[in-house]
Image (cartoon, rainbow, N blue to C red):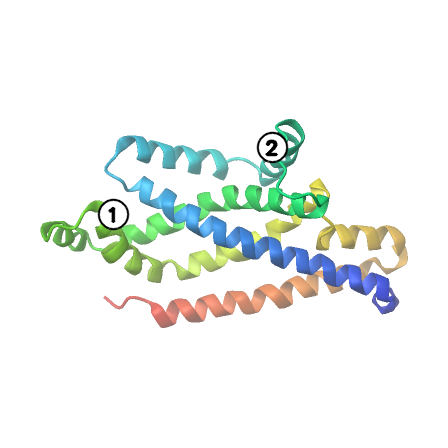
């Protein structure tokens, strides 16, 4: 444990996990908004929108996240010159958020779409019968019920997103996995301790998250 009694190492350890939490939080919000929009497209009566939603899901769900994150850095930033901040760390952070969000939105979309399919068709037909448009039916009648049935799947996606955030370290952000790699290079005789501390910290963050979403899903489940 001598590794973590050094204030410099401890600060790097804390900073690495703070970056992970920042990446997870921002990406979760963006992926949720984008995923719901894509799910709406997937069930839309407009063929072009359905095709766009299906193409997004099929492309990003079957593309490795590493490639998506690399494209954000080498394609959007290095080639096209997209810069979101003057500070390099912050710029990489936002590029990572873009990559994580676009990738995760495909999974959120499918989770939300499965929730929409659990809502009885008669409710949408009744909404249309009283004059509600497709958008109003989706927003007022269908999505609130669908959301309550997909809380557990969304929790699993959030947990996966938190672990996937370590991929952003491959384009230069000094997050938790990068800090762990640096410590392993400097303290080769403390490999097991370093691994246990980092793995234990992830477990301490994610196990309660899983239980919370499980409790919330049971609490808000639609009783039919």
Q: Is residue 201 left or right of residue 8?
A: left
Q: Residue at x 88, y 56 (%)?
A: 187
Which residue shows up at 71% across the image and 47% down it? Answer: 89
Where is mark 1, residue-wise? 135
Callout 1: SS: helix
| Residue 206, image x, y percentages | 58, 63
- Judged from the image, the secondary structure of the residue bearing numbered disc 2 is helix
- Whether residue 160 is visible to the viewer of this picture, yes or no, is no
The percent position of residue 63, horizontal first and vertical second, equals: 54, 35
Q: Specify the quadrant of the image occupied by residue 72.
A: top right
Q: Which disc, if any, is residue 43?
A: none
Q: Quadrant of residue 141?
A: bottom left
Expressed as whole percent of the image width and height from the top left, the position of residue 83 reads: 63, 37
Q: Residues within 10 Å of mark 1 (few under 14, many from 20)?
A: few
Marks 2/1: CA distance? Answer: 33 Å
The residue lying furthest to the front in this view is 86
Mark 2 burial class by Cα count in 10 Å: few <14, some 14-19, many 20+: some
Residue 148 horizontal side relative to residue 75, left or right = left
Please say if 157 is above or below 80. below
Relative height, residue 207 to residue 129 (above, below): below
Question: Quick check: 199 left or right of 122?
Answer: right
Q: How many marks?
A: 2
Q: Residue at x 53, y 66 (%)?
A: 209
Q: Is residue 11 visible?
A: yes
State the residue lying farthest toward the top.
79
The residue positioned 61% from the left and 28% from the top of the image is 80
Q: For residue 76, which numbered disc appears in the image?
A: 2
Quarter the N terminus occupies: bottom right
Look at the numbered discs 2 and 1 and tell me whether their residues touch, using CB distance below 8 Å: no
């Amino acid at each position: 444990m001598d590794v973590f009694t050094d204030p410099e190492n401890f600060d790097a350890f804390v900073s690495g996990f703070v970056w992970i939490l920042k990446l997870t939080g921002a990406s979760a919000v963006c992926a949720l908004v984008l995923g719901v929009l894509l799910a709406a497209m997937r069930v839309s009566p407009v063929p072009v929108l359905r095709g766009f939603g299906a193409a997004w899901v099929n492309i990003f769900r079957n593309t490795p996240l590493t490639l998506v994150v690399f494209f954000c850095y080498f394609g959007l930033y290095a080639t096209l010159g997209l810069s979101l901040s003057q500070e390099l760390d912050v710029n990489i952070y936002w590029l990572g958020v873009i990559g994580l969000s676009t990738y995760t939105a495909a999974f959120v979309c499918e989770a939300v779409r499965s929730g929409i399919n659990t809502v009885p068709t008669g409710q949408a037909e009744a909404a249309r019968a009283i004059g509600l448009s497709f958008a109003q039916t989706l927003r007022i009648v269908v999505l609130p019920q669908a959301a309550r049935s997909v809380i557990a799947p969304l929790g699993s996606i959030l947990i996966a997103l938190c672990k996937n955030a370590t991929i952003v370290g491959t384009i230069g952000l000094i997050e938790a996995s990068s800090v762990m790699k640096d410590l392993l290079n400097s303290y080769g005789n403390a490999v097991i301790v370093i691994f246990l501390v980092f793995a234990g910290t992830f477990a301490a963050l994610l196990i309660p998250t899983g239980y919370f979403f499980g409790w919330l899903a049971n609490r808000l489940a639609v009783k039919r």
